[in-house]
């Protein structure tokens, strides 16, 4: 972990300090993903089988999970975990439902009624990673809003395990959200399959979910295809920024930093505080707690590019946080709610000493699929709205056309679009 | 225009019939855009000047529009047009404001309060095309929701005219929305400038606006940059699908088809009806009205790939429309509102004989920046939400953590993430 005194840095050093770790050659990742796309487009299921053999080291005859596999997963899963998944799901339903948009109508002029319809995206493709660990929580995070939006066709891809089966917890989580079409397929090939469609997998209208750099690059490439699918966001390596004051318990802050660091070597961990004593205490706690973790080696590597920043006051910490736009922002402050107005860009915010990030990861009710790498400046976490389209509607009476038609004619002619003007004028003449 | 009897087509012919016109070599467009990006990234403003000289045929020393230029534009614009723009703006404000999302909070468990904050995207870049015609209406369509969202920094690019000035109507429309930072810069180079930033133009968090194939490809390429800007949508050539019954006035339907066709040779125009007589009458009307249009040649070329489709009943017309997912959908039906439930995918819907598309283009209040090329299956038109991020928040008390913490621990351990479990357990222990 690197200790930084913010006031001692010049502008260039500050920018450098907030930069994400590069993490390998992006051009190489893109080129590899392009090759996968070409293969899948050309050879469909045959390519998927070959790529799965190569990248997952397993031979899959049929990618679709059968009803029997779902049943076996349910039987095999510890009851306590099944209950926990159902409990998490129910809070996810509460929060996501409370945030659903509404249709509306408003008269913008007498006889001109304009509104908005909401519709589920017809066919959505969910990606649930299972790299160093399978993520049943991600199946819930994507499955719940898809279910609430009412998407008619929900497809879920998750990488096969070495024995050719899917992770049972992922299957149970999917089933809890009413998802029956699960495919044992991972990586860029899963994204390509859902983008193009194959005889086995349907072509999807929008792709969702986090993933490694290949999956993220594949989603971005899919979004560039003419007539291709939309994507939820470019969700890359996970990150946390903790703003803490002198009153924050060092053991809790350290635990939060470590829970982020254990995700992967490219995870981003930042502490910003006005207390030098807290930095000392957190550093000692991290060392102590790290030694007890099963994923110590991974966390250790992530901590190499972690930063402990000292600022002169907490207000400055928010300026740093907004410039960085973290995926997760923990406010380990005495009166955290009073600082909320200062948050301009972040994925999800955790208030106070009893709100570890892991609650948001699993079961507070908010969504854990969040923008990373500074994307929180312009993107939002997944919600029901991510699975809907909104369609504008205008209903205009004769009187309405008489009221607003001349305005349209004036602007149409200024733009040199006479046929636009005529579409109004012919109707007005027909009334006269 | 091609007459089609839908029932006579097999599945392949139907798919072919709903395909968008390809329109040139996409790979060539992408390669050209990549070259522009490399130039702008390497040479900043110098590259922008060279590209403007080459593509717009004009030498621009300073891209920024000065206060004097704004003042001259205002003085020069006909009063009637200024009034029309202000009138259009006021209805846009009404509709967009009525559709704004709200922040919310909900208790997902005792002591667990979860909510959503809304924040303006800090810096947004708007693109207002001015190819065959300048589009002040687009400045309003992007400027109004940016203003309502409260974006702190709004940048607008629009191509320079041959004399090096910006279109006065575009400047007046921008000023009406409080936009003061306008740059005389067009095409892929404008998108590159807003994506990377140059000494003159700031780097933007999200890019908005319609454009030609180069602009659209540039936006998609910008969205692929690691840490690059978000985009509103891939908005390509404009399109309309009209569903009409035997009672629809042929002259109005023809006028609507023509107002779409005059946009450009790659515009898409489709009529779907259960009435063969209507097809005959519309065809005759199109021929008659076309001859009177100043943009006859452009419309003529668009009409070459227009389609007049006969279906056996109106229900079938909606199945076709949903498969096609048109940008604009006109329901020239006797009881149009009763059919709204059938609309699954479309950008904007126009109800009845007095709602020409040009009202939505200019002044009904809805937004005219809409998804094209089938993107309406997964994307929505621009709204205030397009200029906001939503940030989730969780505030958890001691009791809240005791209530939901064990659920998080259970799932964390199933995912092999012990540090996630520890972040909960250490806090629970501290309480005991």
Image (spheres, coloured by chain):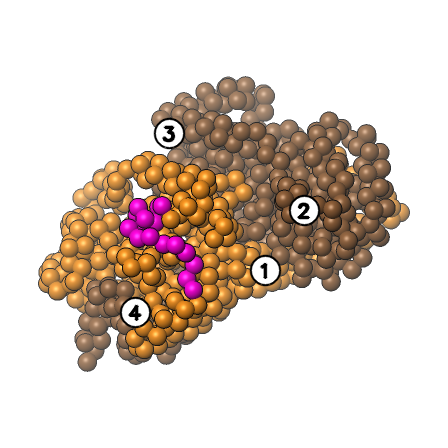
Chain colours: A brown, B orange
Q: Which residue is mark 2?
A: A10
Q: CA distance from mark 4 to mark 2?
A: 50 Å
Q: Are marks 2 and 3 in contact (CB under 8 Å)?
A: no
Q: Residues within 10 Å of mark 4 (few under 14, many from 20)?
A: many
Q: Which residue is mark 1?
A: B118
The secondary element bearing badge 4 is classed as helix
- Res. A411 mark: 4
The secondary element bearing badge 1 is classed as strand
Q: Are marks 3 and 1 on the same chain?
A: no
Residue A58: x and y in percent read 53, 19
Q: CA distance from mark 3 to mark 1?
A: 40 Å
Residue situated furthest front in the rendering? B61
Chain ID of residue with mark 1? B
Asked where in the image residue A280 lies, by quadrant, the reply is: top right
The secondary element bearing badge 3 is classed as helix
Chain ID of residue with mark 4? A
Earlier sequence position, callout 2 versus callout 3: 2
Of residue A169 and residue A54, the one placed in the foreground of this image is: A54
Is A344 a magenta residue? no
Residue A203: x and y in percent read 40, 38
Q: Are marks 1 and 2 in contact (CB under 8 Å)?
A: no
Report whether B66 appears left or right of B239.
right
Q: Is residue B362 above or below residue A218?
A: below
Residue at image x 43%, y 32%? A193
The secondary element bearing badge 2 is classed as loop
Asked where in the image residue A430 lies, by quadrant, the reply is: bottom left
């Amino acid at each position: 972990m690197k200790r930084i005194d913010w006031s001692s840095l010049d502008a260039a050093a500050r920018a450098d300090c907030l930069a994400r770790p590069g993490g390998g050659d992006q051009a190489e990742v893109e080129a590899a993903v392009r090759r996968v796309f070409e293969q899948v487009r050309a050879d469909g299921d045959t390519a998927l089988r070959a790529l799965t053999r190569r990248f997952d080291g397993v031979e899959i005859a049929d990618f679709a999970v059968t009803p029997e596999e779902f049943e076996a997963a349910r039987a095999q899963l510890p009851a306590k975990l099944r209950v926990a998944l159902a409990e998490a799901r129910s809070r996810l339903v509460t929060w996501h439902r409370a945030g659903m948009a509404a249709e509306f109508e408003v008269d913008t002029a007498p006889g001109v009624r304009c509104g908005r319809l909401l519709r589920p995206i017809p066919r959505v493709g969910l990606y649930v990673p299972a790299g160093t660990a399978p993520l049943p929580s991600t199946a819930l995070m994507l499955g719940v809003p898809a279910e609430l939006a009412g998407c008619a066709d929900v497809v879920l891809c998750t990488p096969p395990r070495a024995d050719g089966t899917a992770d049972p917890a992922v299957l149970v989580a999917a089933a809890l959200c009413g998802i029956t079409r699960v495919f044992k397929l991972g990586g860029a090939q899963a994204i390509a399959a859902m983008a193009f469609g194959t005889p086995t997998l349907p072509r999807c209208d929008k792709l969702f979910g986090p993933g490694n750099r290949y999956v993220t690059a594949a989603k971005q490439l899919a979004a560039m295809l003419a007539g291709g699918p939309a994507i939820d966001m470019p969700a890359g390596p996970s990150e946390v920024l903790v703003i803490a004051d002198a009153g924050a318990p060092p053991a809790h802050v350290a635990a939060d930093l470590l829970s982020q660091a254990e995700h992967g070597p490219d995870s981003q961990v930042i502490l910003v505080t006005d207390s030098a004593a807290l930095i000392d205490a957190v550093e000692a706690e991290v060392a102590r707690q790290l030694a007890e973790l099963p994923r110590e080696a991974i966390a250790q590597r992530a901590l190499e590019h972690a930063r402990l920043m000292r600022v002169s006051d907490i207000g400055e910490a928010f300026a740093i946080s907004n410039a960085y736009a973290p995926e997760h922002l923990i406010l380990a402050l005495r009166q955290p709610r009073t600082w909320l107005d200062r948050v301009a860009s972040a994925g999800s915010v955790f208030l106070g000493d009893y709100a570890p990030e892991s609650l948001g990861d699993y079961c507070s009710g908010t969504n854990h699929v969040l923008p990373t790498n500074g994307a929180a400046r312009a993107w939002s976490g997944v919600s029901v709205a991510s699975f809907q389209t909104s369609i504008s509607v205008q209903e205009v009476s004769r009187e309405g056309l008489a009221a607003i038609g001349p305005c349209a004619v004036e602007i149409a002619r200024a733009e040199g679009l006479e046929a636009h003007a005529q579409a109004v004028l012919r109707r007005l003449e027909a009334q006269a």
